[in-house]
């Protein structure tokens, strides 16, 4: 009776033509040792093949630069309220003449000029509403904003002086004020996370008033009351911080210059003069405002 022996079959890796083929080991071959060595060589070759494939792919991949994006969105329409303190300057320049119409001589008119031509500073509360629309590109924010403010500040004075010639006295009373102020301004800024730093500038409007009265002990009198809606310009800067939701709060400074208002008034005099006595008033107005605002953004 013939005896059959089970001959183990093994797989061998073909180096010339990568792949595996079946072979039958000869007598005396340690199949277990052979199989262990073959598995280690297979694992090593697999690692080398994978490294050769993945290396060029990783080397060819270009790293991407992170884009500068603000964590808060500033784009969209918004409305808000603001409140603060406004301090202004009214530079007054008054000329009384002509000299031949001055009672007592030109020196008396020069004395009136000196008393009248002194600045006044209307200071007070400023508050109102604002609205605007922002656009955003990365960290750059730009848009248009308008606001209106009610102003409570006014300034006044009254001075009595002695005429250089004639021996009697004169009194000058003056007052300046602004009822309201409006601005329409582009804004441009740069966002740092939840903070927006910006600059702004544009059109400004205000209703200004100058009141003046000059009297003397001889009964001469002159009255001026002039109101004008003046256009000018506004410049400023601020920082705004995004709160939770769509709310934001800001601190802002604005400077507004409205140029000049003027008036020429004929005085009522109690002496004979070859020409009327005219008071020519020139008043230049400017305002500075420091304020805070709370805004709500409706989104794009």
Image: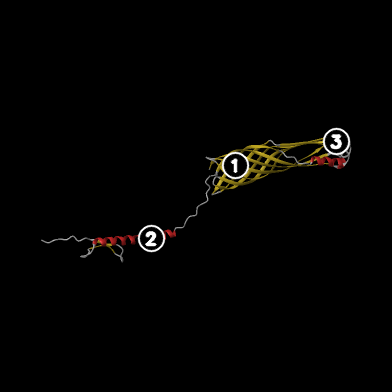
Distance in Å between CA atoms under marks 3 and 2: 106 Å
| Vertical placement of residue 235 versus 63, above or below | above
Single out the residue that lies furthest toward the left. Answer: 1
Instruction: Give residue 82's quadrant in the image.
Output: top right
Q: Position of residue 291 (x, y in %)?
A: 63, 40
Distance in Å between CA atoms under marks 2 and 1: 57 Å
Identify the secondary structure beneath mark 3. Answer: strand
Residue 293 in view in this figure: yes
Observer-side mark, 3 or 2, equals: 2
Is residue 232 found left or right of 132 in the rendered image?
right
Distance in Å between CA atoms under marks 3 and 1: 52 Å
Where is mark 3, residue-wise?
169
Q: Position of residue 116 (x, y in %)?
A: 79, 40
Is residue 156 found left or right of 54 in the rendered image?
right
Single out the residue that lies furthest toward the bottom. Answer: 16
Of marks 3 and 1, which one's residue comes earlier in the chain?
Answer: 3
Of marks 2 and 1, which one's residue comes earlier in the chain?
Answer: 2
Circle on res. 108: none
For image coordinates 63% across by 44% down, the residue present is 185
Instruction: Give residue 233's quadrant in the image.
Output: top right
For image coordinates 57% across by 46% down, the residue present is 196
Q: Position of residue 119 (x, y in %)?
A: 76, 41
Where is mark 1, residue-wise?
250
């Amino acid at each position: 009776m013939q005896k059959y022996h089970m001959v183990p079959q093994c797989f061998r890796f073909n180096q010339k033509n990568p792949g595996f083929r079946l072979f039958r080991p000869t007598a005396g071959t340690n199949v277990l040792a052979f199989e262990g060595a073959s598995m280690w060589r297979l694992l090593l070759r697999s690692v080398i093949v994978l490294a050769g494939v993945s290396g060029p792919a990783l080397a060819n991949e270009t790293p991407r630069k992170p884009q500068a994006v603000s964590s808060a969105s500033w784009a969209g329409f918004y409305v808000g309220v603001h409140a603060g303190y406004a301090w202004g300057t009214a530079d007054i320049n008054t000329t009384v003449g002509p000299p031949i119409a001055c009672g007592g001589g030109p020196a008396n008119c020069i004395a009136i000029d000196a008393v009248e031509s002194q600045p006044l500073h209307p200071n007070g509360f400023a508050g109102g509403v604002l609205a605007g629309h922002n656009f955003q590109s990365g960290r750059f924010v730009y848009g248009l904003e308008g606001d209106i403010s009610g102003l409570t500040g006014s300034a006044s004075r009254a001075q009595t002086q002695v005429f250089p010639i004639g021996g009697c006295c004169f009194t000058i009373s003056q007052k300046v004020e602004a009822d309201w102020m409006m601005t329409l301004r582009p804004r441009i800024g740069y966002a740092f996370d939840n903070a927006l730093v910006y600059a702004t500038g544009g059109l400004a409007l205000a209703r200004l008033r100058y009141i003046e009265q000059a009297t003397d002990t001889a009964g001469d009198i002159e009255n001026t009351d002039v109101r004008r809606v003046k256009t000018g310009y506004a410049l400023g800067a601020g920082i705004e911080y995004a709160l939770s939701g769509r709310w934001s709060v800001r601190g802002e400074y604005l400077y507004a210059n409205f140029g000049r208002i003027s008036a020429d008034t004929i005085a009522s005099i109690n002496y004979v003069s070859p020409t009327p006595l005219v008071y020519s008033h020139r008043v230049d107005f400017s305002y500075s405002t420091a304020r805070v605002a709370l805004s709500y953004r409706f989104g794009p």
